[in-house]
Image: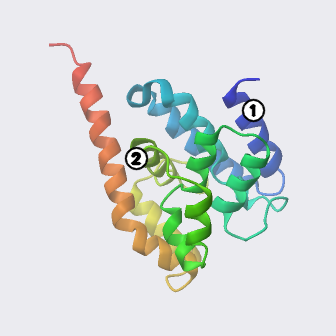
Amino acid sequence: MGLNEWAYSLSESLLSDPLPRRWVHSLGVAKQARALASVLGEDAELLEAAAVLHDIGYSPALVVTGFHPLDGARFLREQGGDERVVRLVAHHSCAVLEAEERGLREELESEFELERPELVDALVFCDMTTTPDGVETTPSERLDEIVKRYGPDTIVGRFIQRAAPEIQAAADRVQGRLALVRSANQPM
């Protein structure tokens, strides 16, 4: 079984029944990852696998700490998942800032190294350009939606507001790489 076949099957088994909206979001994030294949090269499959798996830590079957990046990454590690996918899941979408809000930053950072910055950026972009219903959106609309859904004074609301500048910067870097690839492929 290939990496993506395994990732989709695992994610579906953990999310589709108990959290169908989270499953649809994960499929949308994976779709965004496929759209970045031209800038990712040999890492395209890796990013797509991380994208479809990034929220499995929300699965009721996996909740231990209540912090989904950590719970999901630990589960993937226990399952023998690709180490780079595990690291991307652990650190997706500025997770270190939410970990700090939850008193789990040291745990997250000591257990899981960061993946290459361009892949971290790419997963941030995919997650933050996909609505909870799996529809493409802009990073600013997604950030607003998260604050409204959770409330500005909750752990998630505070973290996402702190993370907003880095999320936007990551999205800008990815869009810049996409623009370079597109311009390089334009006929002269």
Q: Which residue is painted at 40% across and 26% down in the image?
A: 38
Instruction: Describe residue 61's horizontal placement relative to residue 77 as left or right.
Output: right
Q: Which mark is residue 6?
A: 1
User: Could you classify mark 1 by the number of other residues whose Cα lies within 10 Å: few (under 14), some (14-19), or many (20 or more)?
Assistant: few
Q: Is residue 44 above or below residue 87?
A: above
Q: Residue 140: where, in percent of width, then height? A: 38, 62
- Quarter location, residue 64: bottom right
Q: Is residue 136 above or below residue 152?
A: above
Q: Look at label 2 and name its amino acid.
A: Pro
Q: Secondary structure at mark 2?
A: helix
Q: Which residue is painted at 53% across and 75% down in the image?
A: 100
- Quarter location, residue 2: top right
Q: Look at label 1 and name its amino acid.
A: Trp
Instruction: Describe residue 32's horizontal placement relative to residue 118 as left or right.
Output: right
Is residue 113 in view? yes
Quadrant occupied by the C terminus:
top left
Quadrant occupied by the N terminus:
top right
Q: Which residue is painted at 46% across and 52% down in the image?
A: 124
